[in-house]
């Protein structure tokens, strides 16, 4: 016999989780299977909705959606659905800000620029760039991904409406230069004992003491995003109390603690919704006619069938191998759905590093019902929908729209799938 | 296979890539020690995303350990054969606890644990003194079965002696085995003794037939499994093994218990690949005939199933191995996939203490981290509370080493805290060494999911 | 920088201007400066910007020329021995094999073997089985092989070491300095006119910026494929026939030995293990313009599809980029070969006084990397002869900076507190300079994890090369591994600050991103396309590097949200406890 569910979601990233939450909320028995860990761990933890249309920075993302092309996922599902998806996100995810307005906020990046985004972890909130309080950025001399003085100078060059200064300090306790970000976070989470100039003290206290001489009246202090994992709020408030200044995190590239925290929150929510999920085993095959009957999940070498009424494909794009390629072409590897792409691979890219690359838009082709279509425009399987970066036709990196598309299409795919069951 | 006809817009010679598969190459033996394989091409899959590093429980508490990305794809890519001048393996590989979480995490198919196992094997082979205390201590720990055999011959004496403070002092100072831990008690009757007394396979066949009759299955139904009980449930916790037997018989399975040695888990973790290979050869030869006859192999210890399913095929080339490996399952997983275990439990009630569940890392690697929690969600009479995603910290023999004890307890701290906060005061896990750590840190009694199933369906 | 330190022993030493910072020019500069001449070398880009930086890194044993051009073959094996001696930190003696597939002729195999013997190249026949023991990924049907002492050489490191040596002997080296004209007076060439720092102001190694006239007693035109363009400035006709060749870089070494196919001239017949990678080569196609020629898809496919006959796993293996080099081939006007593969790999010294009756300049064209030192020696002999100076060449005897006492220093790796393979790689790159570079009391984190490059090594390179991150890249290999700079371009930029100001850093960072992109375009499928998308997401999504308001014009901060306002506590201590 097979393992059964109403809705089976393949893929455990932001889109998969949102579609599972959406279907579970609508009353379906949901199971999510995810092979490996998602790209949320590589992402900054900021939830972008729409930051740019062309070269224009977007102030109100919902207004700007009309300026996107007709086949863009936002246009397919409609602005109202995007809003509903964001409402689901706001509902299930604690610890995020930005829902008080439709207007984007500008958040500092670890590369020294600012970026328009729609939701941001509360840990990053005090760093918001349309706020004229002076800012001190603090970097650690063992953490090569963030140079605070350079980032501060860069923010000023970008025209930020506040004075920014930066300082590089040693992290208390003489961590080895190749310590992982999780180690910094753990030391702060557990407020570990550290030795500073021969004196035993706690990690948070020692950190505040090291920053204090550089404070010089700055009203807010930004650190690279390593301020704890499980106890991040406490870490931040302890530092803020000790410094008498607001404290925030600058979102970083991979590996990203804000991304990890977001992933944790979403899985906790899914558990609370009573959904089933399992990680670590791939979908290797499927049994299908016009509709998918079941997929085969490989349990560490052994094939086990999983059947469901409805299926959702949320395996991600090129980053997560939800879309793969070789010299001959581009494929979607789980259900082998059609992915439109130029036949000549030299048409997949442009010559400038940030030009308008075709590959950035690779993904399955869907209509407003989010059902993947084959090369002649026919529905691939009647009970399969796709969501998130597996979808083609949009460039999340240029648009700064990755999280928003995953949430909106995930929400819609979960909702439509559940409607079919009822 | 899929019955769909593929669209024809793409070159037909193109084979769709399996999702996130590992490497398509066959690693070859290349380095001077002829047991070591060239895993440099495995680095081709690495994108530097560092997801592996975020999963490493050792790197999070110990900055001396540079994390799996360095240990795996980076070290291998930087390595080369160099005539006359060996590229040495960094000694930090011995700080890896072989929890294999990185392997499970990697979104890109880098064979991380294989890289670590090979590198550790090479390090032990070429750089560790065979006369050192550490080497012999590691061998002693890795070959637990040998000591356990002696221990169960005289269990009461052994239990008394091993935890005698003078003996613990010798362990710590002479051998480098921590005196902070109490050795697990040996059972007065091993599982195999119980099994033989009970009438072995013949008795099992009888029991299975009775169940088939109850279930309406044909008397000669093709339901036969070979049980890999491993060392721990044989010598230390036979009640787990007995629960496995009763549960499978309940669903109409005939059980055989073939000859077997250690699965190799502790040997891999200590870089003792030759010892592991020797035992693996016995295990594979003993199970492959049965698999040929239609038996599936069942483990009750998640590290044993991990070793047979993943580490064996990654590290060894033994006749019949692939068949054994792809027919091996964890016990509860098997019943969930092929019997209506979920349905039976949903209809059942049990009297059992509430349970604080810890998912062992090697269970996670097989996709089983949610199994116990979700399975018992519908079972009346017991509440199961997950105590979080952290590693227990013991990782088999790791936490037994005096110099690793502190790291082990630091890793476990998160789990201990969660256990402390959780309502239940009994623990639950599939892994014997995790259960030692849980008991050590909390003082709770620790049970196995098979025991819960047994209590719900049989007792 | 850039100040001349002319030897005091001579009242007036001739001043020689060398144009071209490739192996030829830099070899000449080192040689002349060691003989006590006053040398200024100018290079339009980085050192090795031209052909030298675009070769497969083979240190020839001479085996490849042993049938077709035995004179070159003999020179190669001689220089091969010299470089092992004076440039040990740039050379890895991998050994090489000429492997024979069943369809390759026995006749040619025997010719190769006897050719090697005739040229004094140590060569031995080994069985297919033995060849596979040595290189386990070789194709199962390789019949047999000839083993030769081929090696791998890092052209960047070799040229940088030569430049350092020349500087130690008083030479002035100017990179990012373009020759805009030759100074001609009374029909004689008396110097060069240059433009410093054509692109980015401060980011120049040497003089800051602007135009300069450099008067010289003699000018050496060592510009390879660009020799004709320099010649034109004085109305001289130099017919260089540039021929392009592709090189495809694999992410890891599939082989640790140089693998040559044992058959007469052909494309795609060599695999060179190079540092952490393996390089597949190459093609040979004549082009019009050495600076502007098509880089084509078929060339890359051809490398993989042909060389997989020797090493089958190349079919599925990851390539990280491809690049093209232009051979500055030259043949005297009366030869007239149709096929560029027929043009000799020998070099020619064109004395324009003899050839064109124009005094003051010598051009050097053709030649190959392995014999760069020998060429330098002959040209230096020719030039000192012109000035009637009696001097001896010492370049074959004095080790290059980094290569002295190298073997002893290799034992001290542990002292640097680096992980074993990182220490190993660093010391291999730095040679005898490892001690002065890596010994530091500061934290020394790894900046480029793919290649194992630490902050200390990066900062050392910056101190030599200035703010041009591409110059730091070629010195250290930082950003040259599998992520192709995805995870370290910003880290490298961070290391430039505060010595260099934010605007300079940003400019250099963008240049590095673009440079890394350029070669990767030819590897965009499978794993490298996945990597490219990850890099793009990291740079554009997480860093907003593509729409940086500092570069792309200001953004209206006031139009955006300034936060939840009243929702925001003055301090965040009021938030509820963590965790779930």
Image (cartoon, coloured by chain):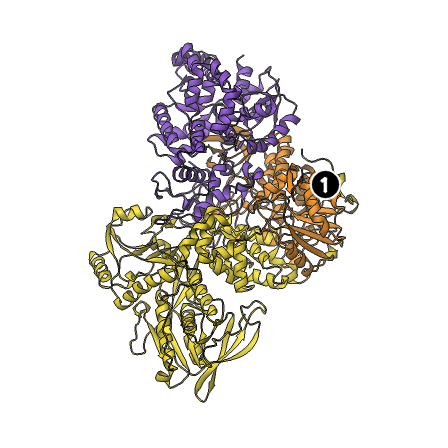
Chain colours: A orange, B purple, C yellow
Residue found at the very far right of the displayed protein: C566
Q: Considering depth in this image, is A58 or C183 the residue closer to the camera?
A: C183
B178 or B240, which lies in front? B178
Is residue A81 left or right of A380 when viewed as pictured?
A: right
- Figure check: C305 above or below C165: above
The residue shown at (53%, 25%) is: B179
Whether residue A395 is visible to the viewer of this picture, yes or no, is: no
**Neighbour class for label 1 at 10 Å: few (<14), some, many (≥20)?**
some
Chain containing mark 1: A
**Residue B2, x across and y down, in percent:** 43, 37
Residue farthest front in this picture: C9
Q: Name the residue under label 1.
A: A238
Q: Quadrant of residue C264?
A: bottom left
Q: Is residue A90 left or right of residue C285?
A: right
Q: In which quarter of the image is residue C117?
A: bottom left
Give the quarter of the figure containing the C terminus of chain A.
top right
**Frontmost residue, A167 versus C556:** A167
Across and down, in percent, residue C353 comes to 37, 84
Res. C411 visible in picture = yes
The percent position of residue A35, horizontal first and vertical second, equals 51, 37
Q: In this view, does A252 lie to the left or right of C20?
A: right
- In the picture provided, is A269 more to the left or to the right than B195? right
Q: In this view, does C573 lie above or below C242?
A: above
Count the marks: how many?
1
Q: Dot 1: what SS?
A: helix
Residue B104 position, x and y percent, is: 50, 37
The image quadrant of residue B307 is: top left
Looking at the image, residue C243 lies above or below residue B416: below
């Amino acid at each position: 016999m097979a393992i059964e569910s109403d809705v089976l979601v393949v893929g455990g990233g932001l889109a998969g989780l949102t579609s599972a939450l959406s279907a579970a909320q609508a009353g379906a028995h949901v199971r999510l299977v995810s092979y490996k860990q998602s790209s949320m761990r590589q992402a900054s933890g900021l939830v972008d909705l729409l930051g740019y249309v062309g070269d224009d920075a977007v102030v109100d993302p919902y207004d700007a959606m009309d300026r996107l092309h007709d086949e863009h996922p936002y246009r397919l599902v409609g602005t109202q659905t995007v809003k509903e998806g964001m409402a689901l996100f706001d509902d299930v995810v604690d610890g995020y800000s930005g829902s008080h307005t439709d207007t984007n906020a500008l958040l500092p990046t670890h590369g020294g620029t600012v970026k328009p985004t729609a939701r941001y972890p509360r840990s990053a909130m005090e760093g918001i760039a349309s706020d004229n309080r002076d800012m001190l950025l603090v970097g650690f001399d063992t953490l090569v991904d963030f140079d605070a003085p350079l980032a501060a100078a860069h923010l000023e060059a970008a025209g930020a409406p506040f004075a920014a200064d930066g300082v590089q300090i040693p992290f208390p306790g003489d961590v080895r230069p190749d310590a992982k970000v999780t180690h910094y976070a753990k030391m702060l989470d557990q407020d570990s004992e550290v030795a500073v100039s021969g004196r035993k003290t706690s990690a948070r206290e020692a950190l505040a003491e090291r920053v204090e001489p550089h404070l010089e009246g700055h009203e807010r202090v930004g650190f690279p995003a390593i301020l704890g994992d499980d106890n991040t709020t406490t870490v931040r408030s302890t530092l803020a109390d000790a410094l008498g200044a607001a404290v925030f995190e600058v979102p970083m590239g991979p590996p990203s603690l804000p991304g990890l925290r977001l992933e944790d929150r979403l899985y906790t929510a899914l558990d609370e919704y009573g959904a089933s999920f399992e990680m670590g085993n791939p979908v290797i095959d499927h049994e299908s006619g016009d509709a998918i009957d079941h997929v085969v999940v490989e349990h560490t070498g052994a094939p086990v069938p999983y059947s469901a009424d409805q299926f959702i494909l949320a395996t991600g794009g090129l980053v997560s191998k939800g879309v793969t390629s070789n010299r001959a072409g581009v494929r979607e590897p789980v259900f082998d759905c059609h992915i439109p792409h130029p036949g000549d691979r030299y048409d997949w890219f442009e010559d400038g590093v940030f030009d308008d690359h075709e590959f950035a838009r690779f993904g399955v082709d869907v209509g407003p019902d989010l059902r993947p279509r084959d090369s002649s425009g026919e529905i691939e399987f009647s009970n399969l929908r796709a969501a998130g970066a597996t979808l083609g036709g949009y460039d999340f990196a240029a648009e700064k729209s990755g999280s928003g598309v995953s949430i909106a299409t995930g929400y819609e795919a979960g909702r439509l799938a559940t409607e079919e069951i009822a | 296979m899929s019955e769909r006809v593929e669209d024809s817009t793409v070159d037909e010679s193109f084979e769709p890539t399996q999702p996130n598969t590992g490497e398509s190459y066959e690693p070859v033996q290349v380095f001077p020690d002829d047991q070591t394989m060239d895993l440099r091409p495995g680095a081709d899959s690495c994108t530097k995303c560092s997801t592996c590093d975020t999963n490493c429980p050792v790197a999070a508490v110990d900055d001396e350990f540079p994390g799996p990305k360095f240990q795996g794809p980076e070290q291998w890519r930087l390595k080369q054969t160099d005539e006359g001048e060996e590229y040495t393996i960094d000694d930090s590989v011995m700080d890896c606890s072989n929890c294999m979480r990185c392997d499970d995490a990697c979104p890109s198919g880098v064979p991380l644990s294989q890289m670590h196992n090979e590198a550790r094997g090479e390090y032990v082979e070429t750089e560790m003194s065979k006369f050192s205390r550490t080497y012999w201590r590691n061998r002693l720990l890795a070959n637990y079965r040998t000591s356990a055999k002696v221990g169960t011959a005289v269990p009461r004496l052994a239990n008394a002696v091993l935890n005698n403070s003078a003996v613990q002092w010798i362990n710590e100072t002479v051998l480098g085995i921590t005196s902070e831990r109490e050795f697990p008690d040996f059972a007065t009757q091993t599982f195999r003794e119980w099994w033989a007394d009970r009438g072995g396979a013949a008795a099992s066949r009888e029991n299975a037939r009775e169940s088939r009759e109850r279930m309406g299955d044909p008397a000669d139904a093709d339901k036969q499994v070979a049980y890999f009980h491993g060392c721990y449930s044989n010598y230390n916790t036979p009640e787990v093994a007995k629960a496995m037997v009763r549960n499978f018989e309940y669903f109409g399975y005939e059980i055989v218990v073939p000859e077997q040695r250690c699965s190799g888990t502790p040997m891999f973790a200590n870089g003792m690949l030759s010892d592991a290979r020797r035992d693996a050869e016995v295990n594979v030869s003993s199970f492959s005939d049965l698999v040929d006859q239609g038996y599936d192999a069942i483990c009750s210890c998640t590290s044993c199933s991990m070793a047979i399913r993943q580490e064996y095929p990654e590290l060894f080339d033994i006749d019949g191995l692939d068949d054994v490996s792809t027919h091996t399952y964890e016990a509860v997983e098997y019943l969930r996939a092929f019997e209506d275990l979920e349905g039976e439990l949903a209809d059942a009630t049990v009297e059992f203490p509430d349970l604080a569940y810890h998912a062992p890392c090697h269970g996670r690697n097989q996709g089983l981290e949610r199994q116990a929690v979700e399975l018992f969600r519908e079972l009346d009479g017991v509440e199961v509370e997950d105590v979080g995603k952290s590693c227990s910290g013991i990782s088999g023999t790791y936490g037994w080493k005096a110099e690793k004890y502190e790291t082990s307890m630091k890793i476990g701290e998160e789990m201990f805290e969660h256990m402390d906060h959780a309502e239940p005061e009994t623990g639950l896990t599939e892994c014997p060494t995790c259960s030692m750590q849980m008991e050590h840190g909390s003082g709770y009694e620790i049970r196995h999911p098979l025991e819960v199933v047994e209590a719900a369906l049989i007792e | 920088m850039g100040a001349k330190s002319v030897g005091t022993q001579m009242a007036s030493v001739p001043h020689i201007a060398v144009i071209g910072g490739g192996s030829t020019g830099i070899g000449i500069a080192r040689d002349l400066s060691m003989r006590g001449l006053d040398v200024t070398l100018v290079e339009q880009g980085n050192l090795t910007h031209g052909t030298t930086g675009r070769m497969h890194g083979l240190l020839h044993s001479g085996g490849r020329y042993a049938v077709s051009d035995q004179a070159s073959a003999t020179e190669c094996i001689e220089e091969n021995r010299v470089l092992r001696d004076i440039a040990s930190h740039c050379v890895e003696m991998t050994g090489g094999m000429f492997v024979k597939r069943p369809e390759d002729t026995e006749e040619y195999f025997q010719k190769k073997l006897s050719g090697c013997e005739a040229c004094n190249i140590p060569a031995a026949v080994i069985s297919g089985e033995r060849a596979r023991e040595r290189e386990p990924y070789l194709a199962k049907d390789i019949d047999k092989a000839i083993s030769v002492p081929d090696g791998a050489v890092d052209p960047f490191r070799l040229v940088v070491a030569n430049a350092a040596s020349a500087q130690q002997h008083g030479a002035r080296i100017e990179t990012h300095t373009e020759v805009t004209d030759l100074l001609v007076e009374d029909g004689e060439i008396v110097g060069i006119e240059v433009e410093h720092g054509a692109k980015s102001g401060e980011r120049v190694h040497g003089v800051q910026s602007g135009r300069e006239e450099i008067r010289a007693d003699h000018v050496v035109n060592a510009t390879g494929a660009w020799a004709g363009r320099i010649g034109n400035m004085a109305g001289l006709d130099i017919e260089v026939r540039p021929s392009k060749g592709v090189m495809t870089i694999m992410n890891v070494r599939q082989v640790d030995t140089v693998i040559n196919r044992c058959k007469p001239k052909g494309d795609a017949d060599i695999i060179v293990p190079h540092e952490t990678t393996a390089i597949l080569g190459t093609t040979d196609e004549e082009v019009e313009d050495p600076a502007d020629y098509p880089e084509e898809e078929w060339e890359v496919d051809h490398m993989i599809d042909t060389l997989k006959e020797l090493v089958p796993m190349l079919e599925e293996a990851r390539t990280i980029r491809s690049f093209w080099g232009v051979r500055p081939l030259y043949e005297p006007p009366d030869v007239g070969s149709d096929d560029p593969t027929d043009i000799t790999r020998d070099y020619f010294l064109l004395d324009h006084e003899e050839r064109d009756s124009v005094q003051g300049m010598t051009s050097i064209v053709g030649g190959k990397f392995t014999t760069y030192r020998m060429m330098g020696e002959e040209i230096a002999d020719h030039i000192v002869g012109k000035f009637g100076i009696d001097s001896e060449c010492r370049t074959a005897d004095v080790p290059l900076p980094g290569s002295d006492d190298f073997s002893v220093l290799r034992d001290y790796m542990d002292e640097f507190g680096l992980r074993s393979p990182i220490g190993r790689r660093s010391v291999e790159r730095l040679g005898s300079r490892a001690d002065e570079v890596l010994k530091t009391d500061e934290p020394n984190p790894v900046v480029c994890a793919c290649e194992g490059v630490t902050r200390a090594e990066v900062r050392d390179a910056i101190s030599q090369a200035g703010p041009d991150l591409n110059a730091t890249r070629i010195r250290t290999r930082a950003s040259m591994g599998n992520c192709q700079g995805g995870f370290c371009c910003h880290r490298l930029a961070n290391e430039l600050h505060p010595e260099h100001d934010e605007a300079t850093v940003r400019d250099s960072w963008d240049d590095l991103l673009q440079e890394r992109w350029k070669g990767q375009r030819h590897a965009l499928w499978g794993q490298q396309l996945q990597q490219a998308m990850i890099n793009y997401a990291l740079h554009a999504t997480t860093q907003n590097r593509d729409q940086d308001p500092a570069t792309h014009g200001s953004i209206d901060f006031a139009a955006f949200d300034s936060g939840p306002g009243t929702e925001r506590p003055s301090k965040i201590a009021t938030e509820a406890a963590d965790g779930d």
